[in-house]
Image: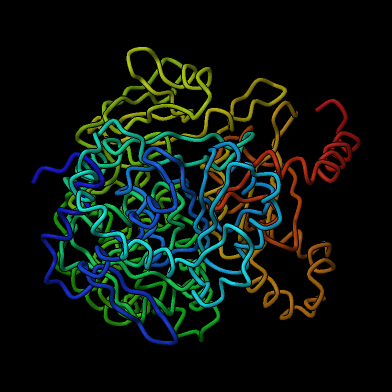
Amino acid sequence: MSVRTLNELFFDAVDRFSSKRAALRAKRNGAWRDVTHQELARRVKHTALGLLELGVAPGAKVAILSENRPEWAVADFGVLTARSADVPIYPTLPAHQVAYILKDSGAIAVFVSNREQYAKIADVRADLPELRHVIRFDLPAESEGAAAPGVISHQTLLQRGAAAEAKHDDYERAALGITPDDLATLIYTSGTTGDPKGVMLSHGNFVSNVLAGLQVLPITPDDSCLSLLPLSHSFERMAGHYTMFHAGATINYAESIDTVSADMLETHPTVVLAVPRLYEKIYARVLENAVSGGRLTRAIFFWAKRNAEAWADLVLAGTPVPVGLNTKKAIADTLVFSKLKDRTGGRIRFFVSGGAPLAPEIGKFFYAAGLPILEGYGMTETSPVLAVNPLTRPKMGTVGPPLPNVEMRIAEDGEILVRGPNVMLGYWKKPEATREAIEPDGWLHTGDIGELDADGYLRITDRKKDIIVTAGGKNIAPQPIENLVKTNKFVANAVMIGDKRKFPMMIIVPEMGPLTAWAAARNLPADDPTALLAHPDVIAKVEREVALELRELAHYETPKKFLLLPEDFTVESGELTPTLKVKRRVVAKKYAADIDKIYEEAEREAPGE
């Protein structure tokens, strides 16, 4: 069948892959357990009927506050086939932000994964009069006698749904009555510049993105993916959930972000979707291992890297590769890159990167290693993918051409404008914000600055709101500069500062492993991170490393001063979004006193410059 809604997508996939061993896999009590399509369909149906029995009427909002696990998928498809809309909430959010989303969306029920997530709901429940039902994945049915009013286990919900099957014999027919224009979900933006906004995405928005994405990226029933990004995020939801399910690939749920390396070794995925931070960490670890090895190990690694990247340059340019270089590449694969492939499970066909810019140097290294990273671009408001590099012809430093059903143009001020069936219905209860974002003729303002090259590939310059304008009127795009710096093995994170200032500066979070080793070799105080980063020799070392990466920048773009921080930014501190993007304004505000002090000292050193 030609699918038009997520409900059609679900029932169609269940029918087509009914004989497949596993739709989903998760680790329970130390062993990976399969969930077949038929078992998933049974649990989805009983969840949907259980919701209807609770009085959750079609069109109601039902939230999901959970980590990635099979129950997340069951809850999602259960809500959708009950003809309601779900509201995914990042499990990393604190209670007050969870309360904001529940209240703003008007959710009448919420699925929660465990005791920790339930505690957030319990803390704010008195302020949420519309929230009538809390459904816990981890609560045994026999424990419900001691539970708070309105709290039941998912197991009990399933039992109620199973008992009501005869009463709802039109379940599938009714679920298939949903139209492409019907609301499927409210996904709240990360709120990097203010309160989160609820993005209204329809069934048709998601399905159009799934079908267009599969025209570019070849996913088949033989594929197996590792689901590690939050399903609350539109990228993982569309690409790692709906697309994989529609294509018949097996979805393996990572135990946590901290177990990804072990999970890859155990599940042997062929496709992994992630954000640049994961690839940056792998790259930094590979460089650190090479540098800390013996002289021979170090020499072999950098010989392999140099020749493999030379090979990659020719292949990516479509230029014939000399026989001698092909031979060197084969030797590099055997001596170096085969080990990296083994550490990622041994079966990776490609990675996909989204959510933030990927440094071209890292992209080329992975491509040279035989582990291509296909960088894409999108936003929650577009369900989310707008462009992605094709496996057959990726271009480093770009996010690929627009998807087949996406129109794209560059406005006079450089902003990327897009139009297509994946563009949101609008912002929930915010008509003015919707009108500001979407023109009457359907063009959506992305807020990103970019350019299309001669082949139609999109290159992102920066966020429109992140552009730094110095006191001298110079425009600086910080993200590409930050990405350059983060390729250095001594740098974990970097944030440019300098709007309305005479010159830019940079906040640096050093990679403490390599820096501590460097300091210890010179008998510097390596035990105390704060004291270490205050040492003049360490400051000078970090500044030299940064200068090395930025040597080709224009003078006005180059940061003149630095602030070193002993600890990286975190989601819990509010400095990162749940998808690990830096909240630039939060960081600038948190360290405002230190930043002001640096500029004041610079003014005293060179007044008037």
Residue at image position (44%, 68%) is 156
Residue at image position (41%, 20%) is 438
- Say whether residue 127 is visible: yes
- Residue 26, image x and y in percent? 37, 75
Image quarter of the C terminus: top right
Residue at image position (44%, 52%) is 54
- Residue 140, image x and y in percent? 50, 76
Q: In this view, does 366 lie above or below 142?
A: above
Q: Is residue 249 above or below residue 584?
A: below
| Residue 27 placement, left or right of 322 | right
| Residue 208, image quadrant | top left
> Farthest right residue?
604
Viewer-proximal residue, 515 or 371? 371
| Residue 583 placement, left or right of 69 | right
Q: Is residue 477 above or below residue 285?
A: above
- Residue 329, image x and y in percent? 24, 71
> Farthest top residue?
440
